[in-house]
Image: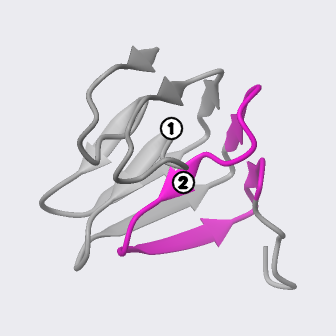
Amino acid sequence: NVATAAAGVGGAVRLNSGNVFVSNSTFNNNTSASTALPNANTFSVNAGRTLTLNNSNIWGAAAQHIDGAGTVVYNYSNVKGITPTATN
């Protein structure tokens, strides 16, 4: 998927309202042309929103895949550009 808007959109998903739980999923080679959130190649997470990744893989050619002022929770997930914590 390629998002071509310059606004803060994710290449695959934009969390503008609500919270999202992603489980047992793979997102690969998504890109965004966003100048507001240049690292949101897969997910754009707005402030006050939470993205929870459970046992999922987020990968692709881009260096970063998640951007925004929201919260991201990683549970046993592999995300390019993110250094896993001890609890991941």
Which picture quadrant has residue 56? top right
Residue 61 appears at what percent x and percent y? Answer: 77, 26
The residue pinned by badge 2 equals 66
Which picture quadrant has residue 76? bottom right
- Which region of the structure is painted magenta? 57-81
User: Circle 2: is it few (<14), some (14-19), or many (20+) Cα within 10 Å?
Assistant: many
Picture disc at residue 65: none
> Does the magenta-highlighted stretch encompass residue 87?
no
Q: Is residue 55 above or below residue 42?
A: below
What's the residue at 87%, 85% (across, down)? 86
What's the residue at 33%, 20% (across, down)? 4
- Along the line of sight, the residue nearer the viewer: 8 or 83: 8
The residue pinned by badge 1 equals 42
What's the residue at 76%, 63% (across, down)? 82
Q: Are marks 2 and 1 in contact (CB under 8 Å)?
A: yes
| Quadrant containing the C terminus in the rendered view | bottom right
Q: Secondary structure at mark 2?
A: strand
Amino acid type at circle 1 is: Thr
Amino acid type at circle 2 is: Ile
Residue 74 appears at what percent x and percent y? Answer: 63, 68
Q: Determine whether, in the image, residue 45 is placed left or right of residue 49.
A: right
Name, please, the residue furthest toward the left.
Answer: 17
